[in-house]
Image (spheres, helix red, strand yellow):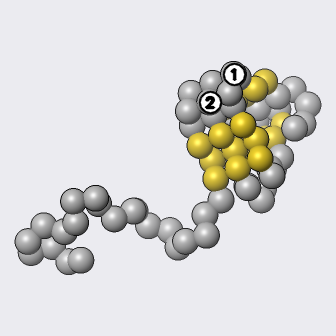
Amino acid sequence: MGPFTSVGPRARVARSEVEYSLLEEEAVVEEVRLRLQECILGVRAEVKSRTASPGPPPHPRGPLPGELA
């Protein structure tokens, strides 16, 4: 945790670096390799590392008839 950072209630920073930032209530920063600087994370915002390739998650309903799976 760097200087001039405000961390709201129940906000969490794990295995990450944050400085000159504001983390509001229940915000989460987890396993981010780059140092976050001059950020504002709103209530319940999450910034986490990804191990999967980028792209939208599958829709819980599954594909509609005629859609590609």
Quarter of the picture containing the N terminus is top right
Q: Residue at x 80, y 52 (%)?
A: 15
The quarter holding residue 52 reads bottom right
Tell me if residue 24 can be seen.
Answer: no
The quarter holding residue 21 reads top right
Whether tag 2 and tag 1 are in contact, CB under 8 A, the answer is yes
Q: Is residue 5 above or below residue 52?
A: above
Residue 31 position within the rendered picture, expressed as x and y whole percent measured from the top left: 73, 55
Counting residues from the N terminus, which is met first, the one under dot 2 or under dot 1? 1
Label 1: few (<14), some or many (≥20) within 10 Å?
few
The quarter holding residue 66 reads bottom left
Q: Give the residue number, with chain letter if any, for mark 2.
A: 26
Residue 64 appears left or right of 43: left
Label 2: few (<14), some or many (≥20) within 10 Å?
some
Tell me if residue 39 can be seen.
Answer: yes
Residue 8 position within the rendered picture, expressed as x and y whole percent measured from the top left: 70, 23
Residue at the outermost bottom position: 68
Q: Give the residue number, with chain letter if any, for mark 1.
A: 9
Residue 30 position within the rendered picture, expressed as x and y whole percent measured from the top left: 70, 50
